[in-house]
Every structure is written in structure tokens, then in C-alpha cells.
Image (cartoon, rainbow, N blue to C red):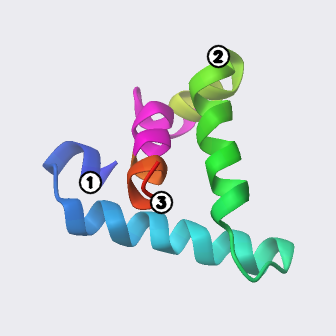
Amino acid sequence: MEAKETGDANVEKEAVEQLAENYKEMFKLDNARSILLDLAGEYLHKQKLAEATDSQFGNGCSEYVAYAIKKYYGV
């Protein structure tokens, strides 16, 4: 949310990289690209998931994270 509020591209990139590292560790993956792009799609197309995430982290968080993930992976 800090990246969303400040528009800081470096913070955005670091957040996605940290998210990727967390998923790699959690699911024992070499690369988290596919799972994060799937997550981005879920955030954009599953309203209940987006609402649950937004209620926990702030309004618009899920959409912002989805777009940040897609931007990071060049999609």
C-alpha cells in the first residue's frame, strides 16, 4: 500500500520481489512467476477475493497488487 499511496516504482518493484520470494519459499518453487500471475488474475476477476484482501489491507489493494505483478512480469 505504501507504493500505491506514494507512486514509488522502486517500492512497488521491491514489494513484488518480496512477494515472489515469499511464494517461492512457501510453495518450494524455483520461480513464482506463474503463481503470481494467476494471483493477479484472481484479484481482477474474483470479486470476493478482492473484497477480502481489500478489507484486510485497504481499499484498492488487490487491484493495485494485480497490476504491479503484471507490470513486474511484463504482462
Magenta stretch holds residue 65: yes
Say which residue appears at 38% left-offset and 51% top-offset: 71
Circle number at residue 62: none
Tell me the quarter of the picture where residue 39 sits: top right
Q: Is residue 7 above or below residue 48?
A: below
- Residue 24 locus on image (x, y percent): 72, 76
Query: Which one is nearer the viewer's eye here, 55 or 73?
Result: 73
Q: Which residue, as the protein is rendered here, is positioned at the far top? A: 47
- Comparing labels 3 and 1, the label whose residue is closer to the camera: 3
Tally of marks: 3
Specify the quadrant of the image occupied by residue 45. Answer: top right
* Residue that appears at 75% across and 81% down: 25
Which residue is under mark 3? 73
Q: Main secondary structure of the magenta part?
A: helix
- The residue labelled by disc 1 is 3
Specify which label sits upstream in the sequence, 2 or 1: 1
Tell me how far mark 3 sits from mark 1, CA to CA: 17 Å
Q: Where is residue 23 in the image (x, y as percent from the top left)?
A: 71, 69
Residue 5 in view here: yes
Q: Quadrant of residue 38?
A: top right
Residue shown at 84%/72% (left/top)? Answer: 27
Mark 3 belongs to which amino acid?
Tyr
Q: Residues within 10 Å of mark 2 (few under 14, many from 20)?
A: few
For label 2, the residue is: 47
Give the magenta part as a residue range.
Answer: 56-67
Going by the numbered disc 1, the residue's amino acid type is: Ala
Nearer the camera: disc 3 or disc 2: 3
Question: Extreme right residue here?
Answer: 28
Q: Where is residue 67 in the image (x, y as percent from the top left)?
A: 42, 41
Q: Which of 35 and 2 is in front in this view?
A: 35
